[in-house]
Amino acid sequence: LHPTRSTLQGVGYVLHRTSMAFEVFDDVAFYWFLMAVMVVVIVPISYSFLSTIQWRVIPNWTRLLSSCKEKVDRQDRERRKEMVSKLFGWRGIGFVSSWVIFLTLLMRLTTMQGEEMYSFNPYKILEVEEGSTPTEIKKAYRKMSLVYHPDKCQEEKCGDKFIKIAKAYDVLTNDATRENYEKYGNPDGYHGTSVTIGLPSWLTNKENELAILVAYFVVLIVVIPVVVGLWWRNSSKFLEDGVMQSTAFRFYRQVQEHTAAKFMPGILASAVEFCEGVPCKREQADDLGKLHKRVQEHFVKNQGDLNNDIMKVKTLLYAHLLREEIPPSLQADMEVVLQHAHRLLNGLLNIVMEQRFVTATMNVIEFSQLLTQALWFHENMLLQLPHFDMQQVNKVMRLLNSAKAEKSSANPIVRLKELGGDKRREALKALSEEQHNDVDIYLNNFPDIEISYDAKVEDEEDVQEGDVLNLTVKIERKHLQEDPGWVDSDEEEDEPDEAIFEKQLAEYEEGTEEYDTKKEELMDEWRDADFDRQKKK
């Protein structure tokens, strides 16, 4: 044996004996350490990956429309394709690889279930009782040497076992080291320490020292700074609402207090996201030029009309609002524009609201609605309905105008719903029954909202200048089905019936200070519980 170093390869222990201590590098402890580290890594990675997967189809009444069948099929294909792409993305690869590593470590630990984290116990190694006499120790040593000595046993585990046997014998046959071990649990005595290090034994191999230092240098000096720098560089480009800062600056420069809705397509088209995501391409020039000619007469000049990329997106937005047919070469770009449009409009909405531009705020909201339904400014709302074109719109308007309506200015869609399906089918005989069923589904799900408000000063009947005004707005969505468990807040009691506290207050005399205090405590508990119920509702 080397006087200062012994290598136990079978179980993976490396003992360094110095004048001060024993240091034990334990492979089993290292695997437990890695398991703990992997659990810390797996939890956020698994959450990050699984939270992005859409496991089920989100309920959507438009899936019932026959006119949306092609769209629904395309969305289902895209959803399946997206799930596969996410599996092979960085989140998916990290999720799979982390679980593979974790299960590999778990299997490795299972094979090591007979091995324990190393603790140097010479009595246990020689299989003798503590306090054994030198004769008994020598007898045990000879007996085990006959079995595990390298001359008697050629297996690798025998050599490792004999190294430990010899070390234990040296400790127990030396009076000083034996006394130190029995007193302090360490052959070196009180001044030494016995440390089990949860690191693999190959770290102590001199042949690996250079590779370990290089790997440590690369990870600490190169990999971590590069990853953090790339993350910061990318995240610093965006605001909290996900809009690029350069895009927000362009929006801010163009929007004003009275910016009309007709200017919104040009403002939206100036987003940097579109310039980078759907730039002009040479092979699209002919189709884009033809599409531009079809919508050019409706164009409104914007301050942001700076380059061809912005004009391309503006042309696509105008074509969408005017329901012009999009050439195949531009359909992919059209999908990208529509995919990001509402997120960017939300960023534009935040800007105008921060500036307190009321008119511009209303116009942004209006344009968002028009973009959703692909409607041109001030067009008839009936064009939102499935299978409706101007021919059907004109027939319905004549029908509505001839019918007696209490409010001639009411929403035509609401009036058409109130008219009933039979009269509508009689007027629109060109539509098939399947198409009429689509119209029925749409009308049943069309929002019917009633808004009411109440403005008052608390504990005051009159409102004076400078008072703090409490504004309560109530929005009722009448088109939704009734919830049998719902209780209108106006019908609920603000305060509980004191009779429910009779048992709790029975031991107190009514009118005393203790009675009033206990009653108020019970009332507060009821209010807190009622607040939680309302919050859940």
Image (tube, rainbow, N blue to C red):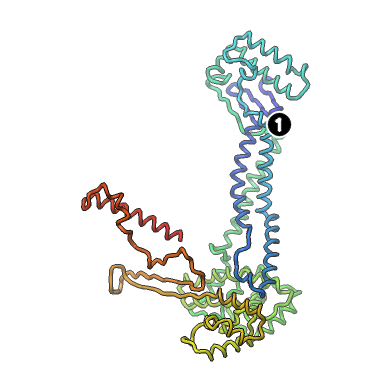
Q: Residue furthest left?
A: 511
Q: Which residue is mark 1?
A: 206
Placement of the C terminus among the 4 image quadrants: bottom left
Residue 54, image x and y in percent?
A: 63, 59
In the image, residue 398 above or below residue 363:
below
Q: Residue at x 29, y 54 (%)?
A: 520
Q: Is residue 301 or residue 323 the one in the foreground?
A: 323
Q: Quadrant of residue 423?
A: bottom right
Q: Is residue 328 or residue 218 the one in the foreground?
A: 328
Mark 1 secondary-structure assignment: helix
Residue 312, image x and y in percent?
A: 67, 76
In the image, residue 323 above or below residue 160:
below
Q: Residue at x 60, y 43 (%)?
A: 39
Q: Is residue 307 or residue 427 the one in the foreground?
A: 427
Give the tally of numbered discs.
Answer: 1
In the image, residue 365 above or below residue 229:
below
- Relative side of 156 to 299, left or right: right
Label 1 CA crowd tier, 10 Å (few <14, some 14–19, many 20+): few
Q: Is residue 266 something one can see in this rendering?
A: no
Disc 1 marks a residue whose amino acid type is Lys
In the image, residue 492 above or below residue 438:
above
Q: Is residue 53 something one can see in this rendering?
A: yes
Q: Residue at x 57, y 13 (%)?
A: 131
- Relative side of 33 to 480, left or right: right
Placement of the N terminus among the 4 image quadrants: top right
